[in-house]
Image (cartoon, rainbow, N blue to C red):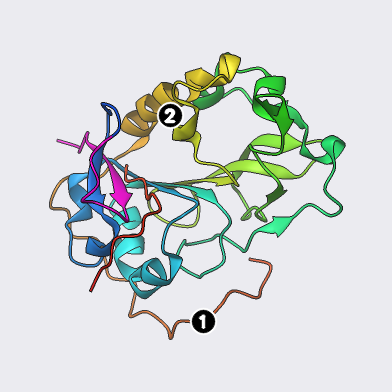
Amino acid sequence: MTATAIARLDMDIRSPESEPSRTDRIDLYAVGSEDLTRYAALIVPAMADQEHLARHRDAIRDYLDAGGVVVFGGHLHRDWLPGAAPFVPLSPPSLRGYRVAEIAEHPVFAGVEADDLTFRRGVAGFFARGRHPVPDGAEVLVRLGGGEPATYVDRVSTGGTILVQASCDLLGYAGSAGGTATRIPDQLLDWLRAESRVRPGATPRRTGTAAPLTSLHRGGLAAVYGGSAPHH
């Protein structure tokens, strides 16, 4: 039986939930010791501690190679996500550049209008202010005005699935004044459960030990939320 629970990695696990959620919360700093195969998907938004994730990149790679799904929404700046390259901001910033120009047919974005992604409370740029270079063979779901890929799905870099979204956490559209974009959170969670192939307790092939931690300088379900609680 495949896993069905979706985990949110939380940097402030002791804080109470503000509202009911369809996802579980697990401590971000348990990555490396937690059995991630209990979860169908891991969702990692912008405020994740990428230093910690980079130290435990092998655990993330093993989870993916076991058939899991990882979603990241933010600006990648450390080497922890297989196949992914550092965030490239749009320059110069402009409304024309931030405007969503193309949305592929995909369950996550079904029924979502481009303007409802471009604007949030009348302001542009919350959805994406740049791009992550797309791995060969990955599927682009959303493009900005200049053709830049804002969202892509990668099924080629690992044995699992990676969804990368530039700048924003897709779960953040829940209950927002985002028009048709409010469809995204539920559609994302449904797609993650359908996409995942991980089985609880699966033991994937190890991919080697982590390289020394360095910054990225090349062109190349758990959600992680920011917090201020100390961790040791």
Residue identifier under label 2: 188
Residue identifier under label 1: 214
| Crowd rating for badge 2 (residues with CA inside 10 Å; few <14, some 14–19, many 20+) | some
- Please provide percent x and percent y for residue 43: 38, 45
| Crowd rating for badge 1 (residues with CA inside 10 Å; few <14, some 14–19, many 20+) | few
- Please provide percent x and percent y for residue 110: 55, 17
Tag 2: amino acid: Leu
Q: Is residue 70 magenta?
A: no
Q: Is residue 180 above or below residue 42?
A: above
- Does the magenta stretch mainly form a helix, a strand or a loop? loop
Front residue (pair 41, 159): 41
Q: Earlier in the sequence, mark 1 or mark 2?
A: 2
Q: Quadrant of the C terminus?
A: bottom left
Q: Is residue 51 above or below residue 136?
A: below
**Rendering quarter of residue 64:** bottom left
For the magenta stretch, what is the residue range?
A: 1-17
